[in-house]
Image (tube, helix red, strand yellow):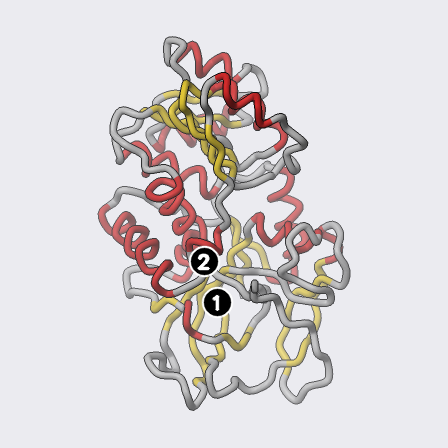
Amino acid sequence: MPRVAPTVTPGQAATTRAIVVERYGGPEELQLREIGLPKPAPNEVQIRHTVIGVNFIDVYCRTGYFDLLQPPGVPGMEAAGVIEAVGSAVSGFSVGGRVAYACPPVGAYCERRNMVPDLLVHLPDDISDDIAAAGLLKGIAASFLLHEVHVVRPGEVVLIHAAAGGVGQLLVQWARHLGATVIATVSSDDKARIVERLGADHVIVYSRENFAEAVMRLTGGAGADVAYDAVGNDTFGGSLAALGVRGHLVSFGQASGPVGNWDIGRLSSKSVTISRPNYAHYTDTPQKLAPQLNRFFAALRQGTIKVEPPRHYDLAAASEAHRDLESRRTTGALVLKV
């Protein structure tokens, strides 16, 4: 059963500032409130957030597409900070320790919160709070997308949509390191220049070129071996068309909206497979999370990937951050500063 966000309980002795979703809807439903903050239970720690990650999963929680949040509740699934209190039954964590997380239950859009520490990450000294909050969830996702959902091998042709976004930038860099030929799609020339600097072999500005036709031209008609698609409805059909025989479509987001009904029989023309990975199924236990963290931190230290400095917003400006994220005008990661 998924862990869901606690509902807001006003009137408790201690309080903290938080962004609350009063009801499902648009960015305007993100309201700054004072909410109750009890002492941590014996099996919890209390974290003072320094930086909070902003991700599309937060949008899905705000709109009610995902049922991880019941209004009124606090969204957010990624943050970095410092432990301020430790429950009597907790071991391995101490006051003053730097930690980060990228996991349910949601509730990160706040100054302080209590959490069971089973999926907390001790932050190494060489990883800043900014980089942790900007890159942890995205780096974990890139790890399992490239190494487990589809194992990228040298010589494969990899198509990556939204390549200038937070996850997209990491996928481009990591896939190139794994020896793949990377074809990236973006919406503008400015974004194309960013992705070219990251090492993409070919960049397609899809606003003026049919990306499926371009992929076929670039591959001599062979198509891509795998397509990583976080855009959803606008790119789904083209992604299938851009794949080669026995290609693999990895659909892991829907920035443009959910994909409509599709006749599964259409996949047989090229024996295409489709995956729809759920982040929680690769991270919901310490045993599943550990290999993702190890790969991500190793890739950072080795210079395989680089997390660009994020774009900052005040906690009170969470609605602005959501508007910018949904407009797809941004590049890289967005964070809330506390």
Note whether 285 is above or below 175 in the view shown. Answer: below
Which of these two is toward me, 277 or 138?
277
Residue at the disc numbered 2: 133
Q: Which mark is residue 274?
A: none
Note whether 273 is above or below 293 in the view shown. Answer: above
Numbered disc 2: secondary structure: helix
Q: Amino acid at mark 2?
A: Ala
- Which of discs 1 and 2 lies nearer the camera? The answer is 2
Note whether 201 is above or below 115 in the view shown. Answer: above
Q: Position of residue 9 (x, y in %)?
A: 70, 78
Numbered disc 1: secondary structure: strand
Report the side of 121 relative to 35 (left or right).
left
The quadrant of the picture occupied by the N terminus is: bottom right
Looking at this view, name the residue that lies furthest to the left. 302
Report the side of 236 relative to 291 (left or right).
right
Which of these two is toward me, 299 or 237?
237
Q: Amino acid at mark 1?
A: Thr
Using the numbered discs, state the Cα–Cα distance from disc 1 to disc 2 in whole angstroms.
9 Å
Q: Quadrant of residue 136?
A: bottom left
Which of these two is toward me, 241 or 294?
241
The quadrant of the picture occupied by the C terminus is: bottom right
Residue at the disc numbered 1: 50
